[in-house]
Amino acid sequence: MPDTQTTIRKDHKKWKCHNKVNDQICGKINDITETMCECNIRRKPDTEALAEDDSVIGEMYKLDDDLTEHWKYFSPEKIS
């Protein structure tokens, strides 16, 4: 398994839904505090991790049966 973490980073503010709805990708951008999208599907592996400016900083790698999320970040956390 790649290097992942179960704690959401401070710069991880949003997530982009990649769930299929009626054979199309949802694509909705959601606040990180929300685990369910407007398409009524929970975030899951391959969900994009987004910063405040909507730049992609990582993705969800794995979702455990107990709903623990494992995030893989592509770049170091920005210090503000």
Image: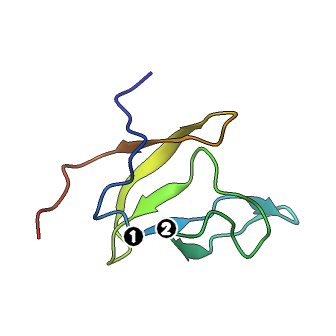
Q: Nearer the viewer, residue 25 or 2?
A: 2
> x, y (%) of residue 75?
23, 49
- Identify the residue shown where x is 52% and y is 69%: 33
Q: Which residue is mark 2?
A: 32
Q: Is residue 34 above or below residue 67?
A: below
Q: Residues within 10 Å of mark 2 (few under 14, many from 20)?
A: some
> x, y (%) of residue 24?
78, 65
Residue found farthest to the top: 1
Q: Nearer the viewer, residue 59 or 25?
A: 59
Quadrant occupied by the N terminus: top left
- Identify the residue shown where x is 64% and y is 59%: 18
Tell me the amino acid under the disc marked 1. Answer: Lys
- Identify the residue shown where x is 88% and y is 66%: 22
Tell me the amino acid under the disc marked 2. Answer: Ile
- Identify the residue shown where x is 62% and y is 75%: 28
Q: Are marks 1 and 2 in contact (CB under 8 Å)?
A: yes
Mark 2 lies on a secondary structure that is loop
> x, y (%) of residue 74?
30, 46
Between discs 1 and 2, the one toward the N terminus:
1
**Left or right, 3 with reference to 6:** left
Quadrant occupied by the C terminus: bottom left
**Left or right, 60 with reference to 35:** left
Distance in Å between CA atoms under marks 1 and 2: 5 Å
**Left or right, 46 with reference to 6:** right
Label of residue 58 in the image: none
Residue found farthest to the right: 22
Report the coloring of the rendering: rainbow
Residue found farthest to the front: 66
Q: Which residue is mark 1?
A: 13
Mark 1 lies on a secondary structure that is loop
> x, y (%) of residue 39?
78, 71
- Occupied quadrant, residue 34: bottom right
